[in-house]
Image (cartoon, rainbow, N blue to C red):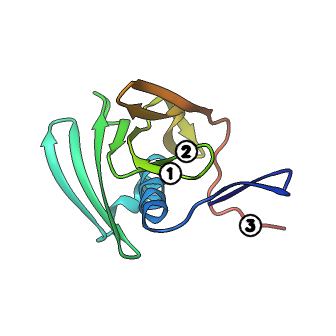
Amino acid sequence: MRVKAAGLVRLVDVSGHEMNQGETVTVFNDMCVMAPATLVDPAIVWEPVDARTARATFTNAGQTIHAELWFNHAGELSNFWSNDRYQTSSDGATVKRVRWSTPLRAYRSFDGVRLASAGEGRWHEAEGEYAYIELALDEVRYNVRSR
């Protein structure tokens, strides 16, 4: 991951195992949140925990990650947790493994697919948890052809 201010000044330049593993968590989270039909992939091993919780192991491109998914009474994904994501310091000099979650809410139909329309990305540090991003979806379109 490279971050540059105004495309000129390098702020962050991180690569390697930790970044690859963290991105695998992100890809799996995106599958769960935005493309639930992909969750029948043989690269995912599911383990039931209770009536509304499941654990998943996802392997992709040599990276294996674990996540726990919580579902509400309507069967909608209400939270995703993983301890396999890494947080990078603001200067990019250090990375540390930190629990990460994406609580979801406000389900509605997007072009015939029921998805959460609001959610957060949260870090769960020893000092406490906090949302570093809040998202609201207005529109979702799949398989859009570019002109």
Is disc 2 placed on a helix, strand or loop?
loop
Residue in the image at 29% along x and 36% along y = 70
| Count of labels in the image | 3
Name the element at disc 1. Answer: loop
Q: Nearer the viewer, residue 113 or 21?
A: 21
Name the residue: 44% across, 35% down: 123
Residue 134 or 110: which is nearer the viewer? 134
Residue at x 22%, y 39% (from the top left corner): 53
Eyeballing the image, is 97 above or below 59? above
Mark 2 crowd level (few <14, some 14–19, many ≥20, 10 Å Cα):
few
Mark 3 vs mark 2, foreground winner is 2
Q: Is residue 95 found left or right of 57 in the rendered image? A: right
**From the viewer's perspective, is 113 left or right of 83?**
right
Badge 1: few (under 14), some or many (20 or more) residues near its Cα, within 10 Å? Answer: few
Q: Quadrant of the N terminus?
A: bottom right
x, y percent for residue 66: 28, 54
What amino acid does circle 1 point to?
Thr
For residue 94, which numbered disc appears in the image?
Answer: 1
Residue 42 in the image, given as x and y percentages of width and height: 29, 71
Q: Which residue carries the number 2 mark? A: 89
Categorize mark 3 by other alpha carbons within 10 Å: few (<14), some (14-19), many (20+): few
| Marks 2 and 1 close (CB-CB < 8 Å) | yes
Q: Amino acid at mark 3?
A: Arg
Q: CA distance from mark 3 to mark 2?
A: 38 Å
Label 3: which residue?
145
Is residue 49 placed above or below 131 in the rendered structure?
Answer: below
Q: Amino acid at mark 2?
A: Ser
Circle 3 — which element?
A: loop
Q: Quadrant of the C terminus?
A: bottom right
